[in-house]
């Protein structure tokens, strides 16, 4: 008698799933396999979008059966999975892995065009990657699968997020190739891979020949407060309008504002990393506002074009739109490019007084640092909203002012400020669903609720709405950095730095990202840029210590003392130190973090213990950040593990450097339970586990 064990096993070959364009499944012989049922197709597609990763059954059931009771949704998932297995039974063995709580596909039995493409890029098979990208062309991921939102709003939003993520990952993969100077066929790769990415409407962050432009604040020929408000408004609106043009990259307003007066156009263009500058002057003649504008070539400072525009002071929007459209046309002519005109923007408010208050409040918010600056900004923005409560952009600006208050001032109620920020952000989104920046700030509140998964979802939504907003780029990059996905974070952070290169706060993120990746020299360079722009040198000291020059690192870290009560403030509720006490504190801190010696480190850890017990905010950044740098795991767990705030959450980006003693927190036996408690594990299951941690 023959037993079942002795029967021959059918030699199954992998099936191939097409994810770009219309969803298709093909057997190993090339024939198409008919997969019937919208949710059956969606289930297989979801699993293929997460190759090598297990997805929680709970997540799948809630996405595909939104609104059903949990038990009903789980039962529907089991039935759909059974139907899918039956439909694949003729061409494939059971292709699924997992138990009662998770599902995954078997890589040996199910492949996809998405997997093939990323494998070709990772294995340096450039000709194959180029061919695949050409085949994909401009096709979106899973075109038509969410038509009419047949599968529900939750699935449609999930799919939009995955599309943004995967296109961003493609850009990152190609960027890594372009930055690899050891690649012999670099010129060939640039001409092929970059061109095919451009066909998909994606711009590599290192792309050469990109039209980069900066709008400089308009000069006034006479001091006039009302005219200054008009000039500020024109500057803001012109940047916002030009940023909507896909072929342009516009320097961030924070960096451009610092060049209100300049001596050299060439030097300014170099510092802002742009190819062209827009400058102008404004004067008033009776009731007429006269605007002179010019386009300068950043390479030689010569004027490429100039024009005059006349309008009425109460018709700012029309004048701005005319100027933006004309500048767009002239840019195309001068640069010999086909540039699409900017879309007509809806007026953010029709009330001149509300708009003036908004501009004043926003200018103070961007400045952020200074005694009473943010309190005054909030006062002005709230006054604007009293006049026009439907002013969506003003609600976004007010949200930003609240979060900056929580981060940059000795605030006694950081969570309260975060909650106010969340209320304002939600109000902005209700009034205008295209307020991407509001979504990214709303993600900060999710972090305080131990929901980094929700924070990342919001950050990707924000990016899909405002992909060229440096604030949105930096927020997405920082959230990825916090969960340890540094390689994915770097392109977004670098893009934010490129668009806002005179914003010192951006360089802290860049320095940490480079340090986490082991690029010590690049981390030091970014740290120096931060210091050159007048911000703290602690990150520079940590990077220098990693290079081995600990004496210099201690001195660099100690230099932060000079910024006390200027760009840095004492912890909330405490009096500022001065004299010998201030010197002693920073000497202890610098040696504890950067000297590499055990006794100074223990001494500083003891000081952190004291601060944790005595400060008004036991989770203050002045405790959390050095604890991470010194590998003081217990303090990290007692602070971040208890309460994440808008002020201390940036500390999380420093957890992921694989250097001593920082790595000690990650290697601590309680780290995974800490990570699960604050929601990191849920985020990793969706967005991928850190390279430094194995998936469990």
Image (tube, rainbow, N blue to C red):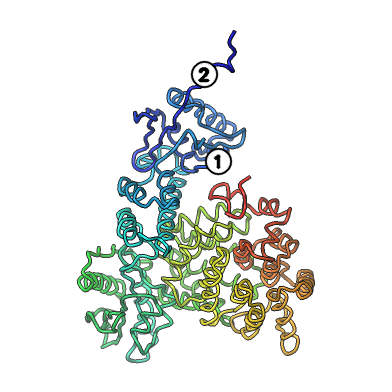
Label 2 – label 1 distance at C-alpha: 33 Å
Q: Quadrant of residue 233?
A: bottom left
Q: Position of residue 516 (x, y in %)?
A: 57, 64
Q: Position of residue 135 (x, y in %)?
A: 31, 45
Judge depth for marks 2 and 1 and give the one in front. 2
Q: Which mark is residue 55?
A: 1
Element under label 2?
loop
Q: Is residue 445 above or below residue 46?
A: below
- Closer to the camera, 202 or 639? 202
Q: Quadrant of the C terminus?
A: top right
Q: Is residue 402 visible?
A: no
Residue at the spot 62% in from the left edge and 65% down from the top edge: 654
Q: Is residue 638 above or below residue 569?
A: above
Q: Earlier in the sequence, mark 2 or mark 1?
A: 2
- Closer to the camera, 373 or 104? 104
Q: Quadrant of the N terminus?
A: top right
Lateral position of residue 539 relative to residue 320, left or right: right
Mark 2 near mark 1, Cβ–Cβ under 8 Å? no
**Residue that numbered label 2 is attached to:** 8
Q: Is residue 242 above or below residue 456?
A: below
In the rendered image, the residue lying farthest to the bottom is 222
């Amino acid at each position: 008698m023959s037993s079942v064990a002795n029967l021959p096993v059918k030699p199954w070959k992998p099936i191939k799933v097409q994810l770009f364009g219309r969803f298709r499944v093909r057997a190993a012989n090339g024939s198409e396999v008919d997969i019937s049922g919208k949710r059956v197709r969606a289930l297989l597609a979801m699993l293929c979008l997460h190759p090598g990763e297990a997805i929680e059954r709970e997540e799948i059931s809630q996405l595909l059966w939104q609104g059903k009771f949990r038990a009903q949704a789980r039962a529907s998932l089991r039935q759909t999975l059974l139907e899918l297995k039956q439909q694949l039974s003729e061409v494939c063995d059971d292709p699924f892995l997992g138990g009662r709580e998770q599902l995954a596909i078997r890589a040996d039995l199910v492949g996809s065009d998405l997997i093939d493409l990323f494998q070709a890029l990772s294995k340096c098979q450039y000709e194959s990657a180029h061919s695949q990208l050409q085949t994909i062309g401009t096709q979106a991921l899973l075109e038509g699968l969410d038509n009419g939102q047949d599968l529900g709003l939750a699935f449609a939003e999930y799919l939009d997020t995955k599309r943004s993520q995967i296109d961003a990952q493609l850009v990152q993969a190609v960027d890594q190739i372009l930055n690899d100077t050891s690649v012999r066929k670099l010129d060939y790769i640039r001409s092929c891979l970059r061109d095919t990415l451009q066909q998909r409407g994606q711009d590599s962050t290192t792309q050469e020949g990109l039209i980069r432009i900066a709008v400089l604040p308009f000069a006034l020929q006479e001091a006039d407060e009302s005219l200054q408000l008009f000039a500020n408004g024109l500057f803001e609106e012109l940047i916002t309008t030009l940023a909507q043009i896909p072929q342009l990259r516009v320097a961030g307003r924070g960096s451009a504002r610092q060049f209100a007066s300049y001596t050299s156009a060439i030097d300014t263009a170099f510092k802002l990393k742009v190819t062209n500058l827009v400058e102008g002057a404004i004067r008033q003649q009776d009731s007429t506002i006269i605007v002179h504008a010019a386009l300068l070539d950043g390479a030689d400072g010569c004027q490429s074009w100039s024009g005059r525009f006349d309008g009425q002071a109460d018709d700012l929007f029309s004048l701005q739109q005319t100027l933006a459209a004309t500048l767009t046309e002239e840019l195309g002519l001068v640069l010999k490019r086909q540039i699409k005109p900017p879309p007509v923007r809806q007026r953010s408010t029709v009330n001149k007084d509300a708009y003036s208050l908004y501009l004043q409040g926003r200018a103070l918010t961007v400045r952020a640092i200074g005694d009473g600056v943010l309190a005054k900004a909030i006062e002005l923005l709230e006054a604007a909203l009293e006049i026009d409560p439907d002013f969506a952009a003003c609600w976004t600006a007010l949200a930003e002012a609240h979060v900056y208050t929580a981060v940059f001032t000795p605030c006694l109620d950081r969570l309260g400020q975060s909650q106010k920020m969340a209320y304002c952000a939600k109000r902005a989104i209700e009034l205008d669903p295209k307020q991407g920046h509001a979504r990214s700030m709303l993600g900060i509140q999710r972090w305080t609720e131990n929901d980094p998964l929700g924070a990342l979802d919001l950050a990707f939504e924000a990016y899909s709405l405002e992909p060229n907003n440096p604030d949105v780029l930096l927020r997405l990059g920082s959230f990825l950095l916090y969960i340890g996905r540094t390689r994915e974070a770097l392109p977004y952070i670098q893009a934010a730095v490129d668009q806002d290169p005179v914003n010192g706060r951006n360089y802290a993120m860049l320095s940490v990202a480079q340090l986490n990746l082991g690029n010590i020299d690049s981390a030091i360079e970014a740290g120096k840029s931060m210091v050159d722009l007048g911000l703290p040198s602690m990150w520079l000291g940590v990077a220098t210590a990693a290079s081995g020059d600990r004496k210099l690192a201690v001195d660099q870290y100690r230099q932060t003392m000079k910024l006390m009560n200027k760009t840095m403030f004492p912890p909330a509720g405490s009096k500022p130190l001065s004299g010998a006490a201030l010197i002693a504190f920073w000497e202890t801190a610098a040696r504890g973090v950067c000297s590499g010696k055990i006794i100074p480190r223990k001494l500083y850890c003891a000081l952190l213990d004291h601060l944790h017990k005595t400060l008004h905010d036991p989770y203050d950044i002045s405790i959390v950040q050095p604890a991470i740098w010194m590998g003081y795991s217990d303090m990290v767990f007692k602070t971040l593990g208890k309460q994440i705030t808008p002020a201390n959450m940036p500390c999380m980006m420093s957890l992921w450097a694989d250097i001593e003693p920082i790595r000690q927190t990650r290697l601590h036996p309680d780290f995974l339970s800490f990570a699960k408690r604050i929601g990191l594990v849920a985020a990793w299951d969706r967005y991928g586990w850190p390279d430094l941690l194995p998936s469990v």
